[in-house]
Image (cartoon, rainbow, N blue to C red):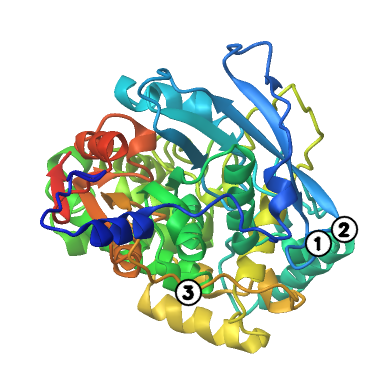
């Protein structure tokens, strides 16, 4: 007998076969008597999302409990979208998608991902997008933050630390004053529960899933909470669940040093072209001399002069060695009296951090006004609400920032500096669960990713014991599938169309 996924069983008694099939059978929508059962029975009203897009792109709203400990209490609406599977005969199910963040709107993901997926995948799945709770068209929150308060990373110095503390406290206070009724419920755990309500409302016994960046963590939490309802899960650019969430900031610092070291080697090998130094040590010195000079006299740039901290803040660009090097050359020339340098690299050369991503296109079917600080508000709701291990003492952040700057000179202070979670109210809702399970999943990862570093992806692989991982050797930037063609595509396609994972973890060339 051949089961889904290509595994063969033989010499089993009828009773044994029955037991195996019972174990493999997915759970029903909700068990009888489950207070969430009425949510599975809601009728969805699909309508065209946007007259400027294809009529095949449809939107609806799904009602979910604000507080899952009180399913009969207040409800909120989730905005979801779909593009139906291309083939009724070949249809396998639904593929939910999340773009990352936290706080990234996902309502338009079906139209954004459809061109990136091969025809055999599009034939098998309804592509399902959704704005997570608190995001975009799904009961969006805002805190009324200033531009400075929406900046997530701040360099540490003894002279500005009091300002950093005041800023972090202000963000927390504003968010709780503005959205205190929703904040305790905007967590990864609750978003995973929302995904399961969406599954049931769509009439599906299982879901498949594609998640990018933070979306990998959300997907992993879903597999932990609902393992029997998880079908085929693709995690693109994965985060280590054990780092949620302060460890993520400090993990960026460690990854930046590795990318910076690689860049010094690359630039040194091309000294005849760029003139930054004949050895990695000389290139390193050139960079730090530039930083020291910019701290004394900011470097002229097209959008305004840049001090050393502003230049260091572009640390994610070092994974893109061919793009960052001309920028450093331009900064060096501008510091010596040349033409003003570009203020920053283009978005394609320097991937944005998840909190800085665009809010995306508003679906005209709903058209809710989204606060301008929506993404930042959700970032802190999730980061602070998911984890209970954020230090409460500002002095702990000061010590960590000083220590991390010594260990990771490039941006260790930014990763260790104080954040609003130091002053966040303790929510009554449960934190995100520890991820450790044997659910099948496919992790795809660039070797040089500035946000979901290779070390972080390996942490996700350790947490998902039934997963396999494909590493793109030499791959640069934040995203594999979302960035277009790569050597991992064939493995992703095979998994989504057949359910079969590679026999072992793989590494492929760019």
Say which residue appears at 14% left-offset and 44% top-offset.
Answer: 508
Cα–Cα span, label 3 and label 1: 27 Å
Check disc 1 and report its element: helix, strand or loop.
Answer: helix
Asked whether the residues under the numbered discs 2 and 1 touch, taking CB atoms below 8 Å apart as contact, a structural biologist would say yes
**Closer-to-camera residue (450/208):** 208
Residue marked by disc 3: 434
The residue at the far right in this view is 177
- Asked whether the viewer can see residue 494, the reply is yes
Residue 81 location, quadrant: top right
Say which residue appears at 74% left-offset and 21% top-offset.
Answer: 364
Q: Which mark is residue 175?
A: 1
**Closer-to-camera residue (463/19):** 19
Judge left or right: residue 31 versus residue 466: right
Check disc 2 and report its element: helix, strand or loop.
Answer: helix
Residue 460 location, quadrant: bottom left
Asked whether the residues under the numbered discs 3 and 1 touch, taking CB atoms below 8 Å apart as contact, a structural biologist would say no
Say which residue appears at 52% left-offset and 75% top-offset.
Answer: 416
- Tell me residue 207's x, y (percent): 47, 44
Say which residue appears at 71% left-offset and 75% top-offset.
Answer: 165
Residue marked by disc 2: 178
Q: Which part of the image, by quadrant, shows the N terminus?
A: top left
């Amino acid at each position: 007998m051949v089961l889904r996924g290509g595994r063969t069983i033989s010499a089993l008694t009828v009773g044994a076969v029955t037991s195996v099939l019972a174990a493999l059978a997915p759970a029903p929508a909700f068990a009888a008597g489950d207070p969430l059962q009425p949510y599975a029975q809601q009728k969805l009203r699909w309508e065209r999302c946007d007259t400027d897009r294809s009529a095949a792109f449809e939107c609806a709203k799904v009602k979910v409990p604000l507080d899952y400990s009180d399913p009969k209490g207040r409800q909120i609406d989730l905005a979801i979208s779909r593009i139906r599977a291309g083939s009724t005969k070949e249809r396998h199910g639904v593929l939910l998608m999340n773009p990352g963040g936290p706080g990234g709107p996902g309502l338009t993901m079906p139209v954004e991902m459809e061109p990136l997926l091969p025809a055999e995948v599009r034939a098998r799945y309804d592509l399902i997008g959704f704005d997570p709770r608190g995001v975009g068209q799904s009961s969006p929150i805002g805190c009324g933050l200033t531009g400075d308060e929406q900046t997530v990373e701040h360099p540490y110095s003894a002279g500005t630390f009091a300002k950093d503390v005041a800023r972090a406290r202000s963000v927390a206070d504003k968010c709780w004053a503005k959205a205190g009724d929703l904040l305790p419920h905007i967590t990864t755990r609750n978003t995973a529960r929302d995904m399961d309500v969406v599954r049931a409302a769509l009439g599906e016994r299982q879901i498949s899933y594609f998640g990018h960046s933070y979306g990998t963590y959300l997907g992993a939490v879903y597999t932990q909470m609902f393992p029997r309802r998880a079908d085929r899960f693709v995690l693109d650019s994965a985060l280590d669940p054990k780092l949620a969430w302060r460890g993520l900031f400090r993990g960026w610092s460690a990854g930046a040093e590795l990318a910076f070291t690689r860049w010094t080697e690359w630039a040194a090998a091309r000294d005849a072209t760029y003139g930054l130094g004949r050895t990695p040590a000389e290139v390193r010195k050139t960079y730090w001399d530039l930083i020291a000079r910019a701290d004394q006299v900011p470097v002229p740039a097209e959008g305004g002069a840049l001090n050393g901290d502003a230049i260091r803040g572009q640390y994610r660009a070092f994974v893109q060695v061919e793009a960052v090097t001309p920028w450093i050359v331009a900064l060096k020339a501008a510091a010596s009296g040349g033409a003003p340098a570009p203020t920053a690299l283009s978005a394609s050369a320097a991937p944005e951090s998840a909190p800085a991503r665009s809010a995306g296109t508003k679906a005209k079917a709903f058209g809710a006004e989204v606060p301008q600080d929506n993404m930042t508000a959700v970032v802190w709701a999730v980061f602070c609400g998911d984890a209970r291990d954020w230090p409460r003492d500002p002095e702990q952040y000061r010590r960590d920032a000083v220590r991390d700057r010594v260990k990771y000179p490039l941006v260790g202070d930014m990763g260790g500096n104080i954040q609003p979670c130091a002053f966040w109210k303790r929510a009554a809702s449960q934190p995100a669960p520890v991820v450790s399970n044997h659910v099948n999943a496919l992790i795809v990862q660039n070797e040089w990713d500035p946000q979901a570093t290779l070390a972080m992806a390996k942490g996700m692989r350790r947490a998902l014991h039934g997963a396999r991982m494909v590493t793109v050797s030499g791959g640069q930037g934040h995203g594999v599938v979302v960035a277009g063609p790569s050597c991992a595509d064939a493995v992703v396609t095979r998994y989504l169309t057949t359910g079969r994972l590679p026999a072992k973890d793989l590494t492929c060339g760019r």
